Image (cartoon, helix red, strand yellow):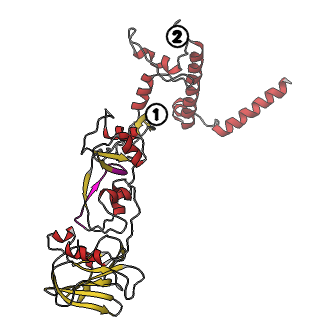
Amino acid sequence: MFGKMVTAIYGQYIKLKSRLNLNKKWHFTNILTNNKTVHATIIIITIIILLINLTIGTKKTLAADDTTPKPALFYLIQSEFAEDEELIIETFDESAVISPEEETYLRNLASVRVQPQVEMKSVGEVEVGQTDTIVQGGSAVVKPNIAKTTKIKRPRTTIIYHLVQPGETVSTIAQEYDISVSTILWENNLNAYSVIRPGNKLAILPVSGISYKVSKGDTLQTIAKKYDVEENEITEFNKITDSSYLKIGQNLIIPGGSKKYSLPTYSSYSGLAALKNLVVPPSSSATKGNKMNWPTEGHRITQYYNWSHHAVDIANKIGTAIYAADAGTVEYAGWGSGYGNQIVIDHGGGKKTRYAHASKLFVSKGDTIAKGQTIAAMGSTGWSTGPHLHFEVIINGGKLNPLDFIK
C-alpha cells in the first residue's frame, strides 16, 4: 500500500518536472520573476486574506448595546479612525418600517426629481378634484388632481334685457339663459307666430315662469291659486318676509307659473261694426315712425315670405278690420285674379302695398288714405283656404319681405 502511494507521488513529480522544465538550471531570481510564479503567489495571498476576513467577521461581535455583526471591511479600515471618532455604518432592513427621516433621505438620492405639474385655469373657473399619487425620487408623493372644471353661474333674482343679435331665435335665447321658450313669449307679449329681429330688446326672467304686477285686492293666496303654484315658492324667491303685506304695483316673479289663456269670442260680421272701425281708427294709427304699421288685428302668421310666396298671410276671423300700413292714394280697389277682393295703395317714391282676400272694401280708386285708416274687412275671397289677409310690399315693381318694412 505504501509502495503504491510512493509510486503515484513520484509519477506526479515527474509530470510536474517535465512541465516546469526543472532539468534546466534555475536561479532564484528567475523563479521570482517567472510569470506563473507571480500569478500563483497573488492568488494564494488573496485566498488567505479572504479566509482571514471571513473568519474574523463571523466571530467578532459589537459592544453589549449593539448585536449587529460588523463586516470584515470594518476591521480593515478601523485603524484609520481615532479612538474618540465614531465609524457610522449604514444598514437597511427590508422588513422594517421606513421612518420619515429615512424616506426623505432616500428621496433626495435621486439625481432627477419629478416636479408636480400645475395646469393654468382661466379666471372665473372653480377647480374641483381629489388627489393623485406620483412617484418622485422612489417614494410616493401626493399632488393635487386638476380635474375638469365647470363654470358656476350665479343665480339671478331680477329681470334683465337681451338685445337680439343676427341669427338668434327665441329658442336659442331661451337655451342661453336656461329658461323655457314660453317664459320669453309671455314676458314680451309674443306668440308662437311672432317674429323677432336683430335689435329687438327682450325681457328675460331669472327663472322659468311669469311675472305679475300686484293689483288692488291681491293676496299671495289668490296669486298662487291663479297660477297654480305654492305660496312658499313665491315668498322664498321674492324674499317676502310678511306674506300678509303686498304693495300695489309690486312686481313678483312666479317660478313655474304659466299664462292662462281664454278662448276668443267670435262674432258674426256686421256692416255696423265695419262703419264703426272706419270712423274710429285703431290706436296703431297714431304710431309715428318711418316704418309702416301692422296692417290688421292679431299677429298670427300662417304663411311667411318665401321664394314662391312673396307676401305674408295674417289670419283672423272674418270681418276683422284691415288698416292702411302707410298713407297714400288708392291705385286699385276691386276684384283681382287669385287675390279676390283687393286694394293696392300707392305711397309714393316707388312704394306700394296690396291687401287681398277681403270680404268687404271700404275705399275706392283715387281715394286719399291716412296711415292706419280702416280700408277693408278680412275675408276668404279668391284663392284662399280660410279667412286671412294677404299682404304685399312692392318696391319699384319688386315684391319684398313685408316683415322688413312693418312693425
Q: Which mark is residue 66?
A: 2
Q: Residue furthest right?
A: 1
- The amino acid marked with disc number 2 is Asp
Name which residue lies at 43% across and 16% down.
87
Give me the disc on residue 140: 1
| Residue 39 forms part of the magenta stretch | no
Per the rendered image, the range of residues in magenta is: 198-210
- Identify the image quadrant of the C terminus: bottom left
Categorize mark 2 by other alpha carbons within 10 Å: few (<14), some (14-19), many (20+): few
- The quadrant in which residue 399 appears is bottom left
Q: Nearer the viewer, residue 28 or 362?
A: 362
> Is-magenta flag for residue 204?
yes
Of tags 2 and 1, which is closer to the observer?
1
Label 1 packing within 10 angstroms: few (<14), some (14-19), many (20+): few
Residue 81: where, in percent of width, then height? 40, 14
Estimate the x, y position of residue 286 in percent, counting from the top left: 16, 69
76 and 139: which one is in front? 139
Mark before the other along the chain sequence, 2 or 1? 2
**How many numbered marks does the figure carry?**
2
Q: Residue at x 32, y 44 (%)?
A: 155
Task: For the N terminus, give its image quadrant.
Answer: top right
Q: Secondary structure at mark 2?
A: loop
Q: Which mark is residue 303?
A: none
